[in-house]
Image: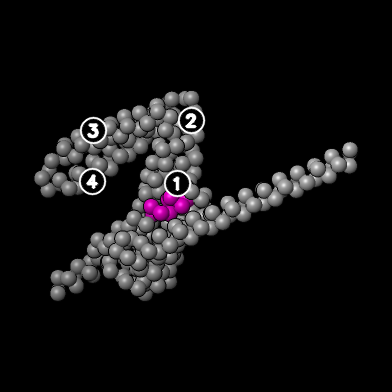
Amino acid sequence: MITQYCISRKIISKENNNRRTCTMKNEKTYELVLTALFTAIIVIMAFTPLGYIPLVVINATVIHIPVILGALFLGPKKGAFLGFVFGLTSFINNTFKAVTASAFVFSPILAADVIGISGVFKSMYICFVPRILVGVIPYFVYILIRNLLKSRQAAWRYAINGAVSVIFCISVRAFLNNLLKESGNTLAGTAAGIVLGAVLFLGLTAMGHKKASANVAFAYAGLAGAFTNTLFVMSGIFILYKEDSVSVLQQDESKLTIL
């Protein structure tokens, strides 16, 4: 009886190990397929008009969206890889197309030609580091916000919602005031920013009361990814290329004037 019991226990243990092995293989296959899918989406967007939109001085982009989604579904390691692919497509586009005045900022090859060897390292940072962080930061923001919103302390919810609403209010105000600067009506931009910020605060608070913490966390993660890309790219250009960007833009303006 003891021998049969031991044999049956070994069989059960072996079956459990086989199931775990199959589950791990399935998870790895799932992650590889999703990684390949997001990589394909990034490449397709990058080399079609969907990804980079030329705005004379710099390209606008929405490629950070699949990078953020990849980070949330697959984790920070795969997200960092997708961010690297994003940066690589930016490097290729700005090197071989160079349709904007600031293309050299994202291309170590062009930067070396414009300002010398130091430009290689500056452009490598701007082209790759912010994009890699886009695939890392949203994941941790999602985990942090989800855990905080699940806590019983309502103060955390109000503090997070208030901080995001204030940032949104300031952004809307700055955008509208820039549009209306010729008319000098800055009061309208300030009022619109306050109203929209209040609406956002109330909406996020209502979603929190409905226990939709995962959805709210996803929204925060998406905002964090977009801010990460914009903040690190623009601050990198301002800090590393402030004087060089001004001189290049002045040269381009003089060429346009001559033409």
CA gap, disc 1 to disc 3? 27 Å
Mark closer to the chain start, 2 or 4: 2
Q: Residue 134 versus residue 240: which sits nearer the camera?
A: 134
User: What's the magenta bit mostly, secondary-structure-wise?
Assistant: helix
Q: Say which of marks 2 and 1 sits in front.
A: 2
Mark closer to the chain start, 4 or 1: 1
CA gap, disc 3 to disc 2? 28 Å
Q: Say which of marks 4 and 1 sits in front.
A: 1
Q: Which residue is mark 3?
A: 195
Q: Residues within 10 Å of mark 4 (few under 14, many from 20)?
A: some
Evaluate if marks 2 and 1 touch, with contact meaning CB atoms under 8 Å apart.
Answer: no
Magenta-colored stretch includes residue 66:
yes
Q: Which residue is mark 2?
A: 150
Mark closer to the chain start, 3 or 2: 2
Q: Amino acid at mark 3?
A: Val
Q: Which residue is mark 1?
A: 138
Q: Which residue is mark 4?
A: 175
